[in-house]
Structure formats: structure tokens, C-alpha cells
Image: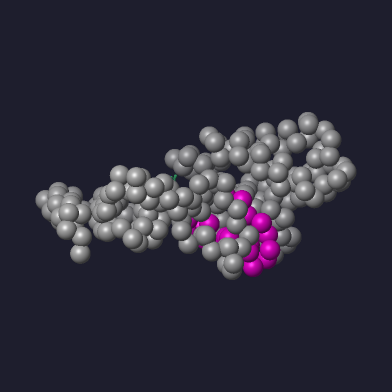
Amino acid sequence: MPFLSALCVYFLIVLKPVLTNTITEDIDVLVFLPQNNSYLFSHARVAPAILYAQQRLQAEGGQYSGIHFNIHFENSDCVNGALFMLLDRSCGQKPDLILGPVCEYEAAAVVRLASHWNIPVISAGALAAGFSNKNTEFSQLTRIAPSYVKMAETFTAMFEHFAWKSALLLFEDDKQERNCYFTLEGVYHLMVDFNIKTYPVSMEERLDTDDILQNIHDTEGNALFPS
Ligand SMILES: *[C@@H]1O[C@H](CO)[C@@H](O)[C@H](O)[C@H]1NC(C)=O
């Protein structure tokens, strides 16, 4: 998984400018990963990579070997689990660094609190457009995967290249984790100069294919006769 190797690289980059000689420091790292293995970023999948990065930093010797990352894993549930765990733990001693959570809503709450406390957060998720605001509530967030706005930039380049003018964004909105919603939200907000229409569908409701086809037809009409 690419973000795991990116994480290891990040560890090296982030430490380099502050170190001239070997220094000894304990850094408490709180890692939020779901035990639920149905997530791509579950504890079982990601924890070995984090522990590997930790071991390599030790084994490399040299200026990084004096830094001890004390890694604590906690469960996260894509809702409020990570937030409540962070609050509970921080009544004792606050962590120096937080890895995760990945899910948008859960990350939003944790990053707001962490930013308030000036604790850096590194996440492979939190990709929604709203996290781009680094001036205030998400100031401490570093994302190691391309955000949805980056994806939207790719779409914009494609639209310009092919001289496309309009698109219908058809997406499933589960009204819970809302990953598809946030994915296309980036496109919707970045591509204001294009004629973009949205069409959410829900897996709980019957798919109205006639209506979808009508919408596709209407969007094509707009492409030919832009208003
Ligand atoms: C694991 O997550 C999936 C997807 O969100 C959910 O459907 C399932 O109920 C969860 N399983 C447990 C044991 O919580």
C-alpha cells in the first residue's frame, strides 16, 4: 500500500531538519486504526507497517536511533471512537503525535481537538475538501495521500484537454461515512466553471434508472447548448 511507504519516508523527512547530532527523545505516538478488518486501513493491515518503520529507524543507527517512538494503538470506529479515546487518554498525558484516523467525520473531530492542543496529526485519510483549510481548525493535519481536491484537479485537466463542458456526478450516498459524497464534493467545488450536476443514489432505495437516464440526457443537452 503506497501510503505505508510514504509514512516511513515521512518519518525520515520530518526528523531531518531538526537533528544535527544524535539526540535522545521519547515521542508518544497515538495511532487510531479500526480493529474491524473490513476497512482497508484496519489495524491488522497497517500496524505492521508502522512497527516496521519504528524498527528500521532503530536499526539504521545514526542520528535517528536515539529517538524512541512509544507507539500506542487504539481502536477507531469511523464515528466517534477515536475522539472519545483521545479525550480519555489526554486527561492523563497528551500524545506528541497522532497517526490516523482515516474516516472523514472521525478525523474531523480528532484533528480539531489536536489542532487546538498543537498535536500534529498524520493521516492516510481525511481527504475531503474541507480539510484543506490549514489556517484554523485543521492546522495540525498532514495528509499523506492525495486529497479529493487533487483528484478534482485531474478531472479539470481532462475536461480542458477534451473540451468537455458538463458532467453528471452520480454517486451513492450512504449518509454515514459518506466516502462517495466527499470524493465527488472535491470535484463539485473545484469545477465551478463547468456545468456540473449531481445525482445521489441510495442503496436502500430502488434505483430509478429512467430518471438517471433522463438526467444524463439533460446534462448532454446542456453540453450542446450551454446557458
Ligand atoms: C465492520 O464494518 C463494516 C463496515 O462499516 C460494518 O458493516 C460491520 O458491521 C462492522 N463489523 C463489526 C463487527 O463491527
- 52 with respect to 63 (left or right): left
Rendering coords of residue 125 (x, y %):
51, 49
Q: Residue at x 58, y 63 (%)?
A: 134
**Residue 164 drawn at (x, y percent):** 28, 49
Q: Nearer the viewer, residue 66 or 188?
A: 188
* Picture residue at 33% right of the left edge, 48% below the top: 159
Q: Residue furthest top?
A: 59
- Find residue 120 and report its image quarter: bottom right
In depth, the one of 149 and 91 nearer the eye is 149
Task: Tell me if residue 112 is in the magenta stretch.
Answer: yes
The total of numbered circles placed on residues is 0
The quarter of the picture where the C terminus appears is bottom left
| Magenta stretch, residue numbers | 103-123
> Which residue is found at the position 54% from the left and 36% from the top?
2
Q: Residue 208: give x, y in percent of width and height.
A: 15, 52
Q: Is residue 85 visible?
A: no
The picture quadrant where one finds residue 110 is: bottom right
Main SS, magenta region, reads helix
Compared to 179, does 226 lie above or below?
below
Name the residue: 61% across, 51% down: 122
| Vertical order, 65 against 160 (above or below) | above
Q: Residue 54 colored magenta? A: no
From this viewpoint, is residue 56 visible? yes
Where residue 100 appears, as percent x and y from the top left, is 58, 50
Identify the colour scheme used. Answer: one colour
Left or right of residue 43: residue 29 = right
Q: Is residue 183 left or right of residue 24?
A: left
Viewer-closest of 180 and 157: 157
Depth check: 141 or 68 in front? 141
